[in-house]
Amino acid sequence: MIIDTSRNSLPVLQALANETRLRIINNLASGEMNIGEIAKKLSISNAITTRHVQQLEEAGIVKTRRTPGKYGLQKIVALAVDQIDIDFPEKIFPEYRHYQTNVKVGHFTDFLAEPTCGLTDETAYIGMADQPRSFLDSRRVDAQCVWVGKGFLEYKIPNMIQPGDHLELLDISFEISSEFPISNNTWPSDISYYINEKKIGVDTVKGNYSDVRGRLTPTWWPDTCSQYGELKHIRINQYDTGIDGIPISNVNIYDLGLENTDYFTLRIASEENVKHVGGLTLFGEKWGNHAQNIKVLTYVS
């Protein structure tokens, strides 16, 4: 599960802000338990245990089911997630001016798509699933979710630098997950990134998430399919390239050849020559957890 610091995440944060509920989570780490077993383990009443479990369930941290027991139906409790990440607000660079460009995830200008692969807008599939020719459908520019089991998506990004600007930093952010048929919350994928055909680094996406529904994901989309991704920030400065604050290569802003060009290319790829070949899924502004497309911020002084 990936949350942020908005009001939408309060139920999760509030559910975790209690010692008893944390003890419940720790006990469930060894396997599912019924309400009575949890209550006995924590030396509290069944009624109090039920209230704590209900709050954890409403936050999406545990899941419950009812099964026949010795004295009627009993509620069985299990963990629904095995990890919770918190995305903090993006950094601000007030000493610089910046230009912003937004590129739709379906507005790619080149691609290689090997199944499982497909596209969908907020109402229906575009073309047919697992048919690479669907990536040439004219409706692809409206896609809100695009996935490939192996291959790449390449975008042309308008270069907004003006005469007299001194380039300081390039910040590219997008929501991404790996790609597994249906979904798999533990399915790492090593994603390679290129700018102007220069490889700037590789980063691992941890899974293809469907443990909870994406906040923006359309209601018609099945619960068991890709729901949301990780919000990634690629930042290239005068010294190196980093993703989410962690350096991944020595490629710097001057290595990219961004001066005196009308555009540059961004390639996001799931390649064969990596440890985890796990595909990729990109989410647009009306899908997943983050209301944005591919967002490019060019900082200048």
Image (cartoon, grey):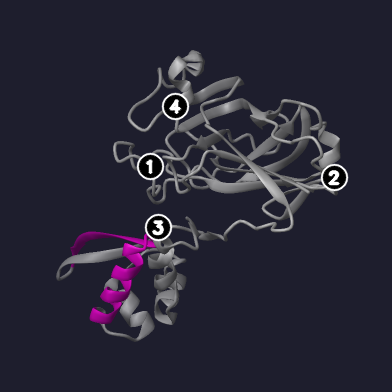
Q: Earlier in the sequence, mark 3 or mark 1?
A: 3
Q: Earlier in the sequence, mark 1 or mark 2?
A: 1
Q: Which residue is mark 4?
A: 142
Q: Which residue is mark 2?
A: 250
Q: Viewer-nearest of labels 4 and 2?
A: 4
- Above or below residue 190? Residue 129 is above
Q: Which residue is mark 3?
A: 80
Q: Dot 2: what SS?
A: loop
Q: Earlier in the sequence, mark 3 or mark 2?
A: 3
Query: What span is colored magenta in the figure?
Result: 47-69
Q: Quadrant of residue 109?
A: top right
* CA distance separating discs 3 and 2: 39 Å
The amino acid sitting under disc 2 is Asn
Q: Which residue is mark 1?
A: 217
Q: Earlier in the sequence, mark 1 or mark 4?
A: 4
* CA distance separating discs 3 and 1: 19 Å
Q: Earlier in the sequence, mark 4 or mark 2?
A: 4
* CA distance separating discs 1 and 4: 15 Å
Image coords of residue 1 (percent x, y): 47, 55
The amino acid sitting under disc 1 is Thr
